Image (tube, rainbow, N blue to C red):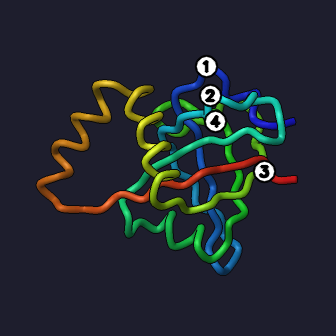
Amino acid sequence: MGFATFSGQRYLNLETFKKSGLGVKTPVWFAAEPTTELDSNDARLYVYTIGVSGKVKRIRNNPCVKIAPCNMRGDVQGEWVAGRAEILSGEEAHHGMQLLNKKYFPWKQLLDFFAMFRKRGRTVFMIRPAL
């Protein structure tokens, strides 16, 4: 099934899970890997966040996530899809950031500029369809 429902979307609602099993939902920007089809099991979506965010901690503890297309407020506009998140580093993280920079130009660059003053690191993670 893949992530075909995310084609043309600007936001996705990401649900990560606490150790207790309670889900935490957050609207986020994402970029799809252009070399794979969104409707395939090889689909990959890239997301970034502040390096020490709760999302990162929850993904480290449990890579199972659910995602759904949404608006900027997080109002879900489609079906939830199961996925697996993987925290990236090095060249893979850089590639994901390049895709996000291209999709959200110039807004992401403006946010990155102001984030420099806070000296907060960024974490990039990839979401694949759960098999």
Specify which label sits upstream in the sequence, 4 or 3.
Answer: 4
Question: Which residue is at a point 45% across and 58% down the rendered structure image?
Answer: 90
Label of residue 82 in the image: 3
Q: Nearer the viewer, mark 3 or mark 2?
A: 2
Label of residue 34 in the image: 2
Q: Quadrant of residue 59?
A: bottom right
Q: What kind of residue is marked 2?
A: Pro
Q: Position of residue 92 (x, y in %)?
A: 52, 51
Residue that protrudes farthest toward the front in the picture: 91
Question: Which residue is at a point 47% across and 52% down the rendered structure image?
Answer: 91
Q: What kind of residue is marked 4?
A: Val
Question: For numbered disc 1, what is the local secondary structure?
Answer: loop
Q: Nearer the viewer, mark 4 or mark 2?
A: 2
Residue annotated with mark 4: 76
Specify which label sits upstream in the sequence, 3 or 1.
Answer: 1
Q: CA distance from mark 4 to mark 3?
A: 15 Å
Q: Position of residue 1 (x, y in %)?
A: 87, 36
